[in-house]
Image (spheres, helix red, strand yellow):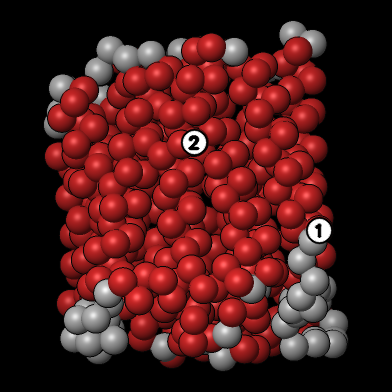
Amino acid sequence: MKSSYISLFELLKISDFTRLWLSNGMWWQAMWMEMLIVGWLGLELTDSAWWVSMLGFYRSIPLLLIGPWGALLTDRFPRRRLLSVFQGLGATAVLLVLLAFLNGSLTYVQLALFSFIQGVIWALDWPTRRAIIPDLVGRERVVDALVLENGIQNITRILGPISGGVALELIGVGGGLVLLSAMGFGSLVLLLGITSRSQAPSVTGGFRTIVDMTHQGWKFVRGNRKIWGVFLITIFMNVWAFPYMNLLPVFARDILGQGPVGLGWLGAAHGLGATAGLLIIHWGRKWLSNEWLFSGGSLLLSFGLILFSTSTSYHLSLLLLFISGLGQAGFSIMQSSIILVESTDDMRSRAMGTLVLAIGVGPLGRLQSGSMAELLTASWAVGSMALMALIATLGTVGYLKGFIRSRS
């Protein structure tokens, strides 16, 4: 067992992968902090659960609009260069929000526009970060690389909300935005050091070629039961489970009686569970297939959120979010792993593009959770939607015969 864990860290001897890994760490850290700071700022500006949820909607809707079409753009350029451009644009957007805040002119509309721009960048950036991994470490080490990637992601899932809450408490919104800007440009510096010439197989042709490629990508995804199952379950989780994150400020302030620091720990509890879940996933791969771990993680995540929605105790809520985070580990690692392992080189970016589309359906869940929280309560919104995610996941596993195998 010890040698198995050591072999994971041998990947860090690959300099390009190490630069990407560290850059991703700063990227994730900034994202978790940004979601908390923007959500809290939106709550202070509007005092409305609906408008707080709408910020999540604005950040997510570009994924639905861009979806698989993004790969047709990104496939035409070296992935290293694309990552640097996307990272630079994201860091600049944070800097502009900081300047507006310091000038005293920041409005909710500007905050919504910022969320939308960050969503556009994320829709192109995230699949590119994942698509470059097989070229850096080799297809046979993809799952190991994603265990490391999710490790640093989950560490930031802990540190991001905590540091975001502490920053709001100690140095205010302005100080938090300064930290976000610094991390964005720091991540850019790391990406500029990558030397890989990774790029999808060259594509020529006009609009007709683009339409044909899109059709081929969908046909490939639909014909592969494992990728299709991941696609469906990803939709259910993003529509009905993950919208809880945008309502955490409402839970913290109005249900659990907490301020920014308490909100930070609520966000961190889920990340602590996801980090602990990495060890379980790495150990469980000996006996269970990737699809088993993905489905089981999705079910545990949903079940934990159902229980969380019923809690009025702060400490019990922390525990339940930790349990939900354990399931997050299986969902996050195996979601991309299954697609990258099952895809051919020429279909890799397009398959990841469909995953972006599945994630992009999430804005529908933000609208649903926001309206339910406004008309009923945030607890009813999170609990009932997580129950729907659990039922839909079970239905997919039962419907797609052959999706789950007993062993990897």
Q: Amino acid at mark 1?
A: Leu
Q: Is residue 245 visible?
A: yes
Residue depicted at 22% across the width and 87% down the height: 407
* SS state under label 1: helix
Q: Position of residue 397 (x, y in %)?
A: 22, 75
Whether 378 is drawn above or below 241: the answer is above
Label 1 crowding class (10 Å Cα cut-off): few <14, some 14-19, many 20+?
some
In the picture, the disc for residue 14 is none
Identify the image quadrant of residue 257.
top left
In the picture, the disc for residue 192 is 1
Residue depicted at 42% across the width and 50% down the height: 154
Q: In which quadrant is the C terminus drawn? A: bottom left
Q: Amino acid at mark 2?
A: Gly
Residue depicted at 46% across the width and 36% down the height: 159
Whether 168 is drawn above or below 234: the answer is above
* 287 relative position to 367: left or right: left
Identify the image quadrant of residue 312.
top left
- Please name the residue that numbered disc 2 is placed on: 160
As measured in the structure, the alpha-carbon distance from the residue carrying label 2 to the one carrying label 1 is: 24 Å
